Image (cartoon, rainbow, N blue to C red):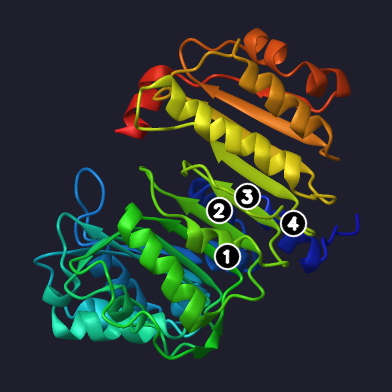
Amino acid sequence: MASFIVPMELVDSMFDELNTPADLFSCSLVCRNWHAFAQARLFSRIQLDSNFGKPPVNTVHKFHHLLSASPHVASHVREVTVCVRAHDSDDKLPWILSRLSNLKSLKIQGSGRVVWENLPQGVRATLETAMTRVARLQLSLLIFSGDMQNIFSLFAKSTVLTDLALFQIFPRTPAPVDVNGPVTQGIRLRSLSLTLKPEVLTYTLHILGTTMDVSELRHLAVHTYSWWDNKALQEFLKIPTLQSLSFAPASPLAYNNPVTFPRVRRISLTTCVLSELPWALSSVVAWWTELFSQSEMRMLEEVNLELVAKSLLDLGDKMWVNLDAALARLPVKKVVVTAKHPRVSAKAIEHSFPQLRRAGVLDVSERIDLAILSASIL
């Protein structure tokens, strides 16, 4: 019987469907060709942490040992998450990062109260160099001695950065000394995600708007947990290339003129507000309604609404009927309402959005376990 040969292009596509390391590892044992396909995916995304998991494992040392024995593995790495700790002084991390020639995405995450300027000089210099050569950069849970202008100067020389995410960054001087710094010609952002304190968020948006090219921004996510001056955000909403928006949560926006979103296809909104007063939620939902009523969204396809436990929800309130009517006038193909609230049922959601339900575009997601929700919020 003639042997059956599967084209390598088909095998490559099959490996793209494997999501777990265990499956990839099993496939790597089949034959030499499969080993190459599996290895490229197993090491495409790695995490470098001196104290990872339980029991703790030093993945920096393990990956250093692997690269010393198999240098070719470095070419497979596309995304790295580096967990920095206050007392780390290992020279193996700079050695590893200097060998990742195909790195595309870098995530730097602090563990504990990590002050960026207190990191060892060698580690900090290597990370700053890596920032300037990746297309996607995320900084999270870090404290900086300077202001936001100093933080942006870390990667201002980049010519390839397109995706930027800042999550819980704490500058000790929130307001920049000079908010009208020089324009960074090399950075043209396509995706921007900000989860920051209100006062930091305001200056961050202003700096981004004045020092970087955001004229081609496609994906915008702005998350904050208090009321704030959102005039800078309104300027970003005027960018005509936006394709997706996410607010979770945000203060009500006041529109002087109707905003148009000619290319927006997906919008995600969350009801979470810190104030337990009913008017706080009503104000947020009211500007959602205003957003969908006044904006021309001819290409809008999907809207995601999350109803979470920290908000006082009364789905019998007229504000939900008004939101339903505002959404029904748009050419949406799917409205996903996720109820992460112990007192909200699927039937209550369907009753609150009658027009969307009759149009067949309402998708009520199953409610997640409250214990899991509480853990995720805390």
Q: Quadrant of residue 288?
A: top right
Residue 87 appears at what percent x and percent y? 8, 66
**Callout 4: 10 Å neighbours few (<14), some, many (20+)?**
many
Residue 235, numbered circle: 1
Q: Considering the numbered disc 4 on the image, is that residue within a helix, a strand or a loop?
A: loop
Q: Is residue 215 left or right of residue 162?
A: right
Q: Report if residue 159 is visible in the image.
A: no
Q: Which mark is in front, 1 or 4?
A: 1
- CA separation, marks 2 and 4? 42 Å
Cβ atoms under marks 3 and 2 closer than 8 Å? yes
Q: Which mark is in front, 2 or 4?
A: 4
**Callout 1: 10 Å neighbours few (<14), some, many (20+)?**
few
Of callouts 3 and 1, the N-terminal one: 3
* Residue type at the position of mark 4: Phe
**Callout 3: 10 Å neighbours few (<14), some, many (20+)?**
some
Cβ atoms under marks 2 and 4 closer than 8 Å? no
Q: Is residue 181 left or right of residue 327?
A: left
Residue at horizontal 43 percent and vertical 24 percent from the top: 311
56 or 178, nearer to the observer: 178
Q: Considering the numbered disc 2 on the image, is that residue within a helix, a strand or a loop?
A: helix
* Residue type at the position of mark 1: Glu
* Residue type at the position of mark 3: Leu
The residue singled out by tag 3 in the image is 18
The residue singled out by tag 2 in the image is 24
Residue 261, numbered circle: 4
Of callouts 2 and 4, the N-terminal one: 2
- CA separation, marks 1 and 4? 13 Å
Residue at horizontal 25 percent and vertical 86 percent from the top: 125
Residue at horizontal 36 percent and vertical 20 percent from the top: 371
Q: Which mark is in front, 3 or 1?
A: 1
Of callouts 1 and 2, the N-terminal one: 2
